[in-house]
Image (cartoon, rainbow, N blue to C red):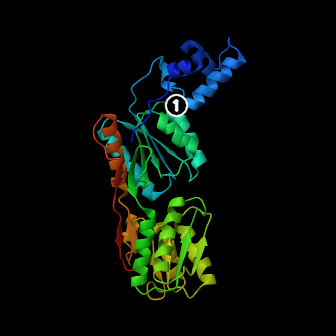
Amino acid sequence: MERKGKANLEDIARATGVSKMTVSRVLRGGSGFSDETRDRVVRAADALGYVPNRLAIAFGADQASTLVGVCVPRLTSGLFAHVLDGVDRALSRLGYQTMIGSHQHAVEQEEAWVRQVASWRPAGLILSGRHHTAATVDLLRHAGMPVVEIWDLTTSPIDMSVGFNHFDCGVEMGRFLVLRGRRRVGFVGALAGADVMSEARLDGFESALADAGLPLADKEMLLDTPGFYAGYYGIETLLARRRDLDAVYFHNDEMAIGALAWCQANGVRVPDDLGIAGWGGMEAASVLPRRLTTTVVPTTAIGKLAAEALVARLKGEHAEDVTVVPTRLVPGATV
């Protein structure tokens, strides 16, 4: 993808007809100029997507950066811990370091993080997902540095994209449950209204059920983070309404494992009475007495590929705009 060069003081000076020194004084909060000049400079800086270079402020000159910013939804997520590990290992091998942050599934928080990190002039940024504020997109397109959007694949990235299609993951699991003879299927999710990628999987799941002439029988959408305990009481709440369900699809593996614990504690036989399916492919899912039915996501590989693509772009080498990383449905023994 074509990227615009980063805006600098000279660009703002040309746009406003004042000297570079005046622009610098305005943006540093100095004095000795009119309010009209200040307003003109600030408006031009905003229009050009300018962010202050903290390295230049600290050392008096632009410095070549080896820092790469990485922003993910939650630092407590086991899946994103593996993504970050893949990024960090690859960047370290290639001579770069990571700056890690999180946005808690809020695009406004991501925008604030991007603005803060961009002011340090990193070598590039790796962002989870493809949903951003318009201001974030505009800033990044003017930033003059490589940007990789990971996890949620987009065919029209800001710069590059490495990931997979969440809707397709949901479709695949929906079709699998139908093939296994499940007809009264529910869903338990978390971060209601915040995790757009989970919502895409649910949309795909419902689409597959609809193709088979089946509705989604019921769903429980929690506000909590998607952990073991959320799965434990999520399945309890759902089955209190619909004890006739014969399968439940979960936001992720942690929630599915929590549901398995509830089923064992309450005499619900899995998979005879109830099928349980997760998503993500966390390691614990493969070592349970009954291996969890789930979708395995190559988390570490996504991080590694994103880091390598970013560094290749920095070096002027070829890097694909879009890299599809395949997921894999594991039938397991819980459906």
Taking the spot 49% from the left edge, 86% from the top edge, the residue there is: 183
> The C terminus lies in which quarter of the figure?
bottom left
- Tell me the element at label 1: loop
Where does the image place residue 64, in percent across and percent down from the top left? 39, 26
Where does the image place residue 262, in percent across and percent down from the top left? 53, 78
Taking the spot 67% from the left edge, 20% from the top edge, the residue there is: 38
Residue lying farthest right? 35
Residue lying farthest left? 317
In the image, what residue type sits under mark 1?
A: Ser
Where does the image place residue 12, in percent across and percent down from the top left? 55, 22
Q: Say left or right for 135 vs 79.
A: right
Is residue 263 positioned above or below 104 on the image? Answer: below
Asked if residue 22 can be seen in this view, the reply is yes
The residue tagged 1 is 119
Taking the spot 28% from the left edge, 37% from the top edge, the residue there is: 317
Q: Say left or right for 29 vs 115.
A: right
Is residue 42 positioned above or below 156 on the image? Answer: above
Is residue 75 positioned above or below 44 on the image? Answer: below
Give the crowd class for mark 1: few <14, some 14-19, many >=20 residues within 10 Å: some
Asked if residue 57 can be seen in this view, the reply is no
> The N terminus lies in which quarter of the figure?
top left
Q: Nearer the viewer, residue 134 or 80?
A: 134
Q: Say left or right for 314 vs 131.
A: left
Q: Nearer the viewer, residue 173 or 296?
A: 173
